[in-house]
Amino acid sequence: MFVACSTLCFARHPLDRALRIINELEFSKVDIAIHEQGSYLKPSEVLDDLQLAMLRIRIGPSLSPAAFDIEIETPTADEYVSQLRAICRLARQSAVSILTIPAASNRSSFDLEILRLRELVHLVETEGLILTVATRAGTLTETPALAVELCERVPGLGLTLDPSHFINGPHQGAPFDEVFPYVRHVHLRDTGRAAGKFQVRVGQGEVEYGRIISQLERCRYDRLLTVAIHDVADAPFVMESEVRKLKYLLESLV
């Protein structure tokens, strides 16, 4: 396994500065957020100018993109597909193999989401890449049972495990061992169950890093563990210090 860092850890900085900080923290892999509502690279910008997008994520020999975290917002399904196809081309040119998108809202039709994801998995697999949906509260992956059913009914679909949403969301910290065979990527921060405790200092929450890694090893997982602490204005800690702390902890466990 490899420890990576999400650009969302430094979202208040411009992308080039965020990448420099991640490089200075001695990460070798980076998970790049491509969000339409973000301050970084947007899916619509990738579609408009692929070469410029390539230049913006070009980092240097010691740090390389390893995953994309994608949030596309378009009025039509056709436009969504066009933007995702452009991101696939960016991924292939950047040697990125994992793409993460959110599943539909938990108020959406499960059957319609299955049909949508089957089409998207086919598109992404045609490009030689892996599509995952993040385990996220408020979506159709907010409980382990729903996440597993989605993967079983959409062949080729994987999960980006974000245990914080199983701890702080409606699942409230109950076991989630059934998801591990479907995990293709991991996002980590420390989290408590109470309201307002989605993100706490490393060591003050309930994320069992050692147990998660052990379960992943049993499933022969050999991909990324991404530090994904959100850079929010009211974070009760210095971001660089907290990211470094979680990096060292994860590296000591793999």
Image: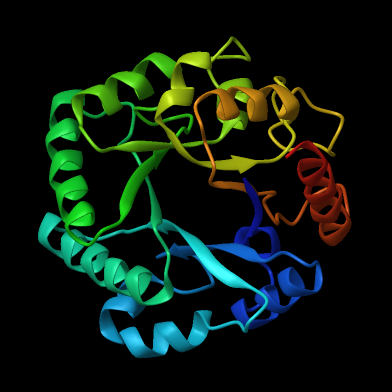
Give the image location of residue 91, x and y in percent. 37, 68
Q: Which image quarter: residue 192?
A: top right
Q: Measuring 59% from the left and 22% from the top, which residue is drawn there?
A: 215
Examine the rendered structure and indicate whether residue 124 appears above or below residue 138: below
Examine the rendered structure and indicate whether residue 203 appears above or below residue 131: above
Relative to 101, 12 lies left or right = right
Report the number of discs: 0
Relative to 117, 40 lies left or right = right
Inspect this view and state whether residue 30 appears.
yes
Relative to 168, 74 lies left or right = left
- Quadrant assignment for the C terminus: top right
Q: Which image quarter: residue 156?
A: top left
Give the image location of residue 177, x and y in percent. 53, 15
Relative to 35, 214 lies left or right = right
User: Furthest-top residue in view?
Assistant: 174
Give the image location of residue 26, x and y in percent. 78, 67
Give the image location of residue 11, x and y in percent. 64, 65
Examine the rendered structure and indicate whether residue 44 appears above or below residue 217: below
> Between 23 and 162, which is closer to the camera in this rendering?
23
> Between 44 and 203, which is closer to the camera in this rendering?
203
Q: Which image quarter: residue 134?
A: top left
Examine the rendered structure and indicate whether residue 93 appears above or below residue 120: below
Q: Measuring 60% from the left and 82% from the top, which residue is drawn there?
A: 59
